Amino acid sequence: MKKIVIQGLGYVGLAMMTFCAGAKKKNKYLYNVVGIEKNSIKGLKIIDKIKSKRIPKIVDDKKFSKFYSKLIKDNRIKTSTDDSEYSEADIVFVCSNCDFDFIKGKVKLKSYIKNIDQISKKIKNNCLIIIQSTLPPGTTDKILEPVIKKNLRKRGIKNFYLSHSFERITPGKDYFTSMKNVERIIGAKNEISLKSTKKIFKDIFNLNPKKIIEFNNPSESETCKIIENSYRATNIAFIEEWRKFCSKNNLDLEKILSSIRQRKTHNNIMRSGIGVGGYCLTKDPLFAKASSEQVLHEKFEFPLSSKAVEVNQKMTFDVMSELKNRFNKKIFGKKILLIGVSYREDTNDTRYSPAEGVFNFFKKMNCKISFYDPIVNYWDFTESHSIEKRNLNNFDVYVYLIKHQSFKKLNISYKKKSLILDLNHVLENNERSKISNNKNFESYFIGSQQQ
């Protein structure tokens, strides 16, 4: 039985370890699998949670939980901090993050290269390394491959195989489905690397060959991920500048956008919102310029991608500043309820959530803040500010931030003379109309014509 080692057990690594451990043929497991984390406070914490045999908090998908629980019972989920596990690996999936330093404006390549250095000092002959991390285009070809070659040459090892295949996993209720059914992008260094990577993905996910897309090299795969997320981030930033214009001139942006979407060429135009969150869109567009400066050493500026991130970073503050100017007396020192605090609907993921910017804004206005989110089970403010459903009725300001499915049945008896703010299209049109027409309330619905 071949051995697979997964490096990094976050959102991507946890899912990859689980699917690799669950891969079967004729009712027999195919691989011996182990997940590796750093011997650090954070890494040990992750290992302890997994070894406790409980479903990790980052998962809120019933399909995945059922799959994971079955593998726990079969003793298939194994983790370690011992890097000697790499020495017997036939396949290594690298799922650790490559982070961005927003202060220095650079990708943290040194720490990521250290991970690859650690692996390549241990692996055996003919090992296949599959990079799943989001990287600046050119990183695998120009930086990682030379590091691997250098370390293997010192040990007298001639053969290794290398490919890049980025992950598109979706946090939340589609965690399992998005991992299993998504198209696999593969940019391999040579034909053997490509064939080996394709076989692994077919074994693990039982994939139709049509769902495997081949690129000529890892740089194309890396570029694909960056363009994909830069496009989405730029679309969001584009709508933000029009939101400001329409808000200033009392124009109904959502009605305008709805009309534009009738054209098939424009049906993916974004909606207005409170801000961009999550691990990818907040940083990935900056990897383009980082590639030219830190990897390829060529002068490309990427002004649109860079500006999109700048606009999106300010979005939450700009929206809240408009609300302060309009409702200052209604907000200052009042009791505030935030409804939904994850970065996207139906997930418990709070990484870079706009809710944090909203929370801090109200805090500076001397408000007493609570939040209600039955899906989120970890956030910096959970212990002191989270409340139960039965306690939602006695607030001065209600702030809707995320459209969880469960909120469709959320009937709140708003306090008389309260202010209701829908900052992310959470409320349905009929509910908005009831609120707008009720003289007991004041309201603001982002992107809509304000009375």
Image (cartoon, rainbow, N blue to C red):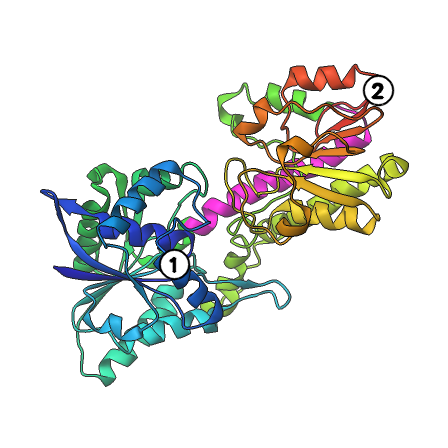
| Residue of label 1 | 9
* 175 vs 282: above or below: above
Residue 47, numbered label: none
The stretch in magenta equals: 225-251
Which one is nearer the viewer's eye here, 107 or 177?
177
Q: Quadrant of the C terminus?
A: top right
Please provide percent x and percent y for residue 327. Answer: 86, 35
Looking at the picture, which amino acid does disc 2 mark? Asn
Please provide percent x and percent y for residue 221. Answer: 36, 53
Please provide percent x and percent y for residue 118. Answer: 34, 75
Looking at the picture, which amino acid does disc 1 mark? Leu
Q: Residues within 10 Å of mark 2 (few under 14, many from 20)?
A: few
Please provide percent x and percent y for residue 90. Answer: 18, 64
Q: Is residue 194 magenta?
A: no
| Residue of label 2 | 440
Magenta stretch, main secondary structure class: helix
